[in-house]
């Protein structure tokens, strides 16, 4: 239906163009033919009108009918490509660009108006100024994006714009971020694959929104497409966790398009994004933790949280443990608490595979976690 409407409009445009051109060119045609059409009274005028109508309707109408499919295909193809490009640009950027172009066009007309009366170049001055100032206005508006959006956010009557920007799931730096997204957290690949963030969210220990950049999703997709079965399983598990988070927490999960083409490493991009938007990074990656802290980015390490909430064990405390395996040193055995904390038991090797009462001798806290050292007190038949 749309193509038919376009075809009809194109044919009508060609016919109208043909009628106008033929009417304008008739005096020259008649002069070439040596026949004054308008000078021969009513008959001459009638002949002129017939020629004009015939050329406009048949020649240009037929030309429009033939060219219509090509013109329509070109317009629709170009509009589709334009739509794809614009769909990748955040809505707020488009609105800000339109605002900047509008200001530029207004200034161009105000400045170019007095020059429009100049001979020869006068009519072209406003056009040139419009092109230049509209481009300049769009670029300046993009660079002042946060100031412009922040101004409208401060207007009470435009509070709905804040919700709209929130719905668009766009992360920006500057004052607007400070007011709207100061409690948001960035998720890295390792913590998504880990999955414990879901339990922490359910317990209510994370406020704000969880922000997942597209480059993190791309890394998860690469892992899920890997030929290595372990990496493939991790990638698919990570994507499943993202989907579960979206289903459970809806608007609290933000997927953002921010990227840095000059960086190739996902961790480096995440640190820069966290630094630009002043947001904390949730991770369990020890190296990312250190790099982020060096660059002044706040980090919430899930492993550190897990260690912090483990039961406090002090020297001299007694407990019953199940000895799982032999230790590295002679005579040692290894046991584990329910939370995964390793217990190294001196002289416990001969009791491996059974329960034993042990006495804690010392507790060692490391970056990787906590380790408990103990010795056998009384062996109980397991």
Image: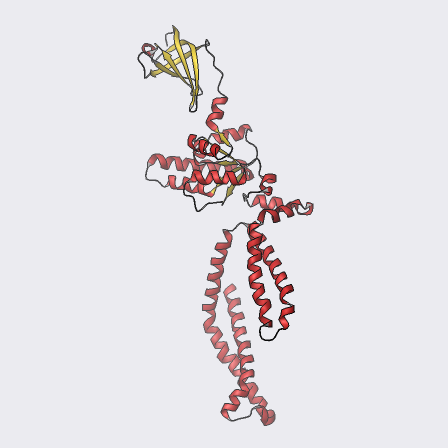
Tally the marks.
0
The C terminus sits in image quarter: top left
Query: Residue 359: where, in percent of width, then height?
Result: 42, 9
Residue 206 to residue 20: above or below: above
- Outermost residue toward the top? 378
Which quadrant of the view contains residue 138?
bottom right
Residue 284 to residue 143: above or below: above
Query: Residue 207: where, in percent of width, then height?
Result: 57, 32
User: Colour scheme in the image?
Assistant: secondary structure
- Foreground: 221 or 302? 302
27 sits left or right of 331 in the view = right
- Foreground: 267 or 6? 267
Q: Residue at x 43, y 40 (%)?
A: 266
Q: Residue at x 59, y 89 (%)?
A: 45
Query: Residue 42: where, in percent of width, then height?
Result: 61, 92
Q: Residue at x 60, y 55 (%)?
A: 99
- Outermost residue toward the left? 330
Which quadrant of the view contains residue 41?
bottom right
Residue 63 visible: yes
Q: Residue at x 56, y 50 (%)?
A: 143
Residue 1 visible: no
Residue 281 to residue 218: above or below: above
Residue 35 to residue 130: above or below: below
Query: Residue 5: where, in percent of width, then height?
Result: 53, 67
């Amino acid at each position: 239906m749309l193509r038919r409407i376009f075809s009809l409009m194109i044919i009508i445009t060609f016919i109208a163009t043909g009628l106008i051109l033929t009417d304008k060119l008739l005096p020259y045609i008649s002069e070439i033919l040596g026949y004054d059409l308008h000078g021969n009274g009513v008959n001459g005028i009638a002949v002129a009108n017939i020629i004009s109508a015939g050329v406009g309707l048949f020649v240009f109408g037929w030309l429009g009918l033939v060219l219509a499919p090509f013109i329509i295909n070109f317009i629709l193809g170009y509009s589709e490509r334009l739509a794809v490009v614009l769909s990748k640009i955040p809505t707020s950027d488009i609105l800000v660009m339109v605002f900047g172009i509008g200001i530029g066009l207004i200034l161009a007309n105000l400045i170019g108006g007095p020059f429009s009366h100049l001979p020869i170049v006068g009519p072209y001055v406003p056009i040139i100024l419009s092109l230049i100032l509209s481009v300049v206005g769009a670029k300046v508006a993009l660079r002042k994006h946060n100031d412009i959006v922040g101004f409208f956010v401060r207007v009470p009557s435009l509070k709905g714009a804040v919700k709209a920007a929130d719905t668009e799931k766009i992360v920006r730096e500057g004052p607007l971020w400070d007011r709207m997204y100061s409690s948001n957290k960035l998720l890295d690949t390792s913590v998504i694959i880990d999955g414990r963030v879901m339990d922490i969210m359910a317990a209510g220990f994370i406020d704000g929104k969880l922000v997942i950049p597209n480059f993190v999703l791309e890394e998860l997709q690469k892992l899920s497409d890997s030929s290595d079965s372990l990496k493939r399983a991790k990638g698919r598990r990570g994507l499943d966790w993202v989907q579960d988070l979206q289903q459970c927490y809806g608007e609290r999960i933000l997927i953002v398009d921010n990227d840095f083409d000059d960086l190739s490493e996902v961790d480096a991009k995440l640190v820069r994004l966290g630094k630009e938007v002043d947001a904390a990074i949730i991770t369990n990656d020890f190296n990312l933790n250190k790099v982020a802290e060096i660059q002044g980015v706040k980090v919430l390490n899930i492993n550190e949280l897990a260690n912090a909430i483990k039961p406090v064990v002090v020297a001299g405390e007694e407990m019953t443990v199940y000895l799982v395996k032999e230790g590295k040193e002679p005579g040692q055995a290894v046991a584990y608490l329910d939370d995964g904390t390793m217990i190294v038991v001196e002289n416990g090797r001969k009791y491996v595979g059974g329960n034993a009462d042990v006495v804690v001798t010392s507790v060692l806290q490391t970056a990787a976690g906590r380790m408990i050292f103990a010795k056998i007190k009384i062996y109980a038949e397991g």
